[in-house]
Amino acid sequence: MDKVAAKVLQLAEQYRDYTAANLSRLVRIKSLSAGEKEMAAELKKQMKEAGFDHVRLDGLGSVHGRVGKGKRLIAVDAHIDTVDQGNLENWSEDPFSGRVADGFVYGRGSVDQKGGAAAMVTAGRILAELGLKNDLTVLFTGTVMEEDCDGLCWKYIIEEEKIRPELVIITEPTALGIYRGHRGRMEMRVSFKGLSAHGSAPERGKNAITMGARACLEIEKLNERLNGDDFLGKGSITVSEFVSGSPSLCAVADFARIHLDRRLSAGETKETALAEVRALVQGLPATVEVLQYCEKAYTEKEYGMEKYYPTWKLEADHSVVTCAEAVFRSLFEKEPRVDKWTFSTNAIAITGIHHIPCIGFGPGDEVSAHAPNEKIAVDDLVKAAAFYALYALQWNGLTKSSPGSK
């Protein structure tokens, strides 16, 4: 292990309790999408206490903390909203306890993904102490509304705040693997228009439920024949909601609607996915559409996007990936696991829409995301903090100008 890596790891270990305590404070704050105000204030406070050079909120309420004052920019991202706790009977303790015990921090969001936020605060503290050279700044973002609409926060950062880093590290859970892609997704709605008639004479009407049910069976068949990619895997499609309506429960249904969750592998696009579904309902009185998201952030800023989240991946030999591998080896003296996420992240906007190179490296295992009894190992937090700090130092030494995409 070289001297710089050893120093970074030593500092990350030195701040073990500090990182765990910071995460505990974050977990104790309930922060559902569009309700992150208190969480953002706490993260902003932690960044200032860690010695960041500048900390602010953007228009949507995401936290921006900068270390360094150079013109070149790389970013590390953690979303600060979480899903709700679900059925409390499935939890063995308070989901918002933030308890630190037995080498773990317990509670909702510890893995998904406040653990990444706490680790990046410690990484910022390490970088503030060691100093950055070569005209580099590291932007640490605590982003909002990701659980409701992944990528929306970074769409705002890039398109409205006009911030475009050279690369971004996503701190979503990877069990300390290096992730270089994931499938995209989109949300579609298919609406069927029927004709009501008395339930005693259904032949006089056109049953929208029957139309929708037949379409559901065809969608199940479509899922089986979708193609895939050697790295990302196959695409998928499933019906996640079925809604219907009629003049009464003694009448033929004149309306039905299904909601589709479509996961997109390499080569699949919004246009190809729409065409597949439209072909299934051809000849029926049906409309197929991609849904829109538009909500108010806790700042009262209203913002939205189409619910199409593009697929992305970096090639295995991309400089952003190979740098991550070199950093991992320097710190942990073993080979990293390079893989992909099952779920979707803010990278759909960063790389999928705006083609900024992105990798994932996060503490905790994604199987704990959205699950009861969520907890994260403090060891993971220490290693993640060291990784983010050394990556910035390593990238800083590799190049003095933007490498672009390979």
Image: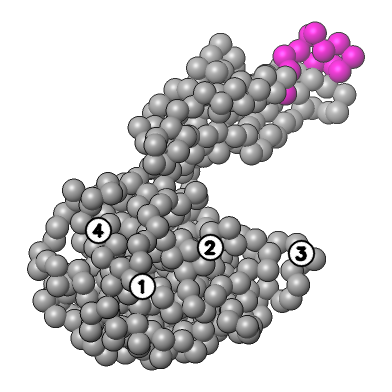
Give the CA separation, mark 1 to mark 3: 36 Å
Mark with earlier residue (3, 2): 3
Q: Position of residue 84 (x, y in %)?
A: 64, 64
Q: Secondary structure at mark 1?
A: helix
User: Nearest the camera: 83 or 160?
Assistant: 83
Please state which of the two labelled residues, at mark 4 or mark 1, is closer to the viewer.
Answer: 1
Q: Position of residue 182 (x, y in %)?
A: 41, 47
Amino acid at dot 2: Asp
User: Nearest the camera: 376 or 283?
Assistant: 376
Give me the residue at 63% from left, 74% from top.
Answer: 107
Magenta residues (range): 197-209
User: Does the CB distance between marks 4 and 2 fall below 8 Å?
Assistant: no
Q: Main secondary structure of the magenta part?
A: loop
Image mark count: 4
Amino acid at dot 4: Thr
Q: Quadrant of residue 374?
A: bottom right
Q: Residues within 10 Å of mark 4 (few under 14, many from 20)?
A: some
Mark with earlier residue (2, 1): 1
Give the CA separation, mark 4 to mark 3: 41 Å
User: Does the CB distance between marks 1 and 3 fall below 8 Å?
Assistant: no
- Residue assigned mark 4: 322
Q: Secondary structure at mark 3?
A: helix
* Magenta span contains residue 333: no
Q: Position of residue 86 (x, y in %)?
A: 71, 61
Q: Quadrant of residue 100?
A: bottom right
Amino acid at dot 3: Asn
- Residue assigned mark 1: 332
Give me the residue at 48% from left, 63% from top.
Answer: 175
Residue 365 is marked as 2
